[in-house]
Image: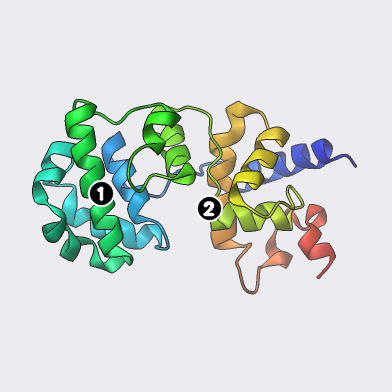
Amino acid sequence: MTAETRAKKIEKIIGEMYPDASIQLDHSNAFELLVATILSAQCTDKRVNEVTKRIFPKYNTPDKLASLGEANLIPLIKDCGLYKTKSRNIIKTSEILATKYNNEVPSTREDLESLPGVGRKTCNVVLANAFGIPAFPVDTHVFRVAHRLGLSDSKTPEKVEEDLCNLFEPENWIKLHHQMIIHGRTLCKVQKPLCDKCDLKDLCLYKQTD
């Protein structure tokens, strides 16, 4: 079976497993999504959603959040970990968006990745979910699932992203990204993956070598 044929089979099955997969970070605009994604580094989406409930009702635009200041943001996001770095990046990014981008989140990779705290994964999340631009964010779940399913054996998230983008059509990247994340959270867990409950087990290299 060719890699392309396996990929198509996997895409069909995972699509049937998680037809309603979508982003789990609560947000109502591109800026909220950007902030939530920055906060999500080494933190669960559930925790981020609890934290952003304290912030977004009052500070949901760049100028409003910038006015809060780093010192006042820290206690609000302390539950997310790495809070000093995240607070500094979020406030600096908010200031740049307020002054340089007229309070809007830019929709180009170059502009997004120039913002403090915005790496490739965060950029891809915003492009895909705020603007509907095809992108394939690779977080720890996608990285693990891609390896176990034999969709990539690359060592970095950037290379795994490249492998996945080469295997699947751009119009399917966003949905597949969400489906792989949910699969990683519910069945294909780091420890004790629930292989016997997985419809992908016959195509899974991890299960076959278990």
- Which residue sits at x=68%, y=51%? 146
* Distance CA(mark 2)–CA(mark 1): 20 Å
Looking at the picture, how far across and down is residue 107, in whole percent? 38, 27
Q: Position of residue 114 (x, y in %)?
A: 37, 37
Q: Secondary structure at mark 1?
A: helix
Judged left or right of residue 94, residue 80 is: right
- The quarter in which the C terminus is drawn is bottom right
Query: Foreground: 132 or 202?
Result: 132
List x then y, in percent, for residue 3. 83, 41
Amino acid at dot 1: Ile
The answer to the question of whether label 2 and label 1 lie on touching residues, with beta carbons closer than 8 A, is: no
Disc nearer the start of the sequence (2/1):
1
Question: Which residue lies at the image location 11% right of the left edge and 46% below the top edge?
Answer: 58
Residue type at mark 2 is Asp
Residue 201 sits in which quadrant?
Answer: bottom right
Query: Residue 127 or 177: which is nearer the viewer?
Result: 127
Residue 103 visible here? no
